[in-house]
Image: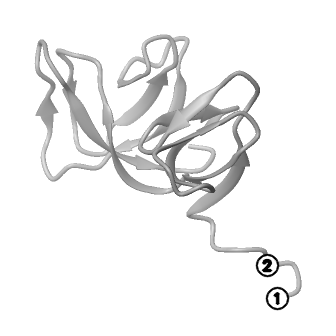
Amino acid sequence: MKNYVQKGDSIRVKVPASTTWIIGQAVLLGAMLGVVEATNNNTASSTTGEVVTMCITGIVTLPATVSQTVAVGAKLYWDATNSVVTTTSSSNTLIGRHGAEAPVTTASSGAVYLDVILTKGA
């Protein structure tokens, strides 16, 4: 097909001014969440103007809000204020669905992570 550009699992974007991104970091790009998967300079981080590859579809593990019960397939949102995944839709951006084998209740403290099925334009 003439207008095919690439597979849609990842995109390449420039790091904005006064910013540093690290591999594995979740970044909200407008209404789409991406996870930095590689840097152009083959280091663990990239700074202003450098190009990174961001995963925008697939299953990724991301930090989550504590003390929430999450059903398989539940809608998940990105809380940009706290940089965590949540089931709370108000003031947050829809990023995908919960992709674990069974429902989970996130811990009440410590490191909390959820498997997220990222979907473009969730």
Q: Secondary structure at mark 2?
A: loop
Q: Are marks 2 and 1 in contact (CB under 8 Å)?
A: yes
Q: Secondary structure at mark 1?
A: loop
At 50% across and 11% down in the image, what residue appears?
A: 81
Which of the pair 54/68 is nearer the observer? 54
Quarter of the rendering containing residue 4: bottom right
- Relative to residue 3, is residue 113 depicted above or below? above
Colouring of the image: one colour
Which of the pair 39/66 is nearer the observer? 39
Q: Residue furthest bottom?
A: 1
Report crowding for label 1: few under 14, some 14 to 19, many 20 or more residues within 10 A (C-alpha). few
For the C terminus, the quadrant is: top right
- Relative to residue 56, is residue 20 depicted above or below? above
Gap in angstroms between the C-alphas marked 2 and 1: 6 Å
Q: Where does label 2 land, which residue?
A: 4
**Amino acid type at image mark 2:** Tyr
Quarter of the rendering containing residue 69: top left
Give the left or right position of residue 103, taking residue 72 as reference. left
Give the left or right position of residue 113, taking residue 93 as reference. left
**Amino acid type at image mark 1:** Met
- Number of numbered callouts drawn: 2
- Relative to residue 44, is residue 107 depicted above or below? above
At 62% across and 66% down in the image, what residue appears?
A: 8
Report crowding for label 2: few under 14, some 14 to 19, many 20 or more residues within 10 A (C-alpha). few
Q: Position of residue 93 (x, y in %)?
A: 55, 26
Q: Where does label 1 land, which residue?
A: 1
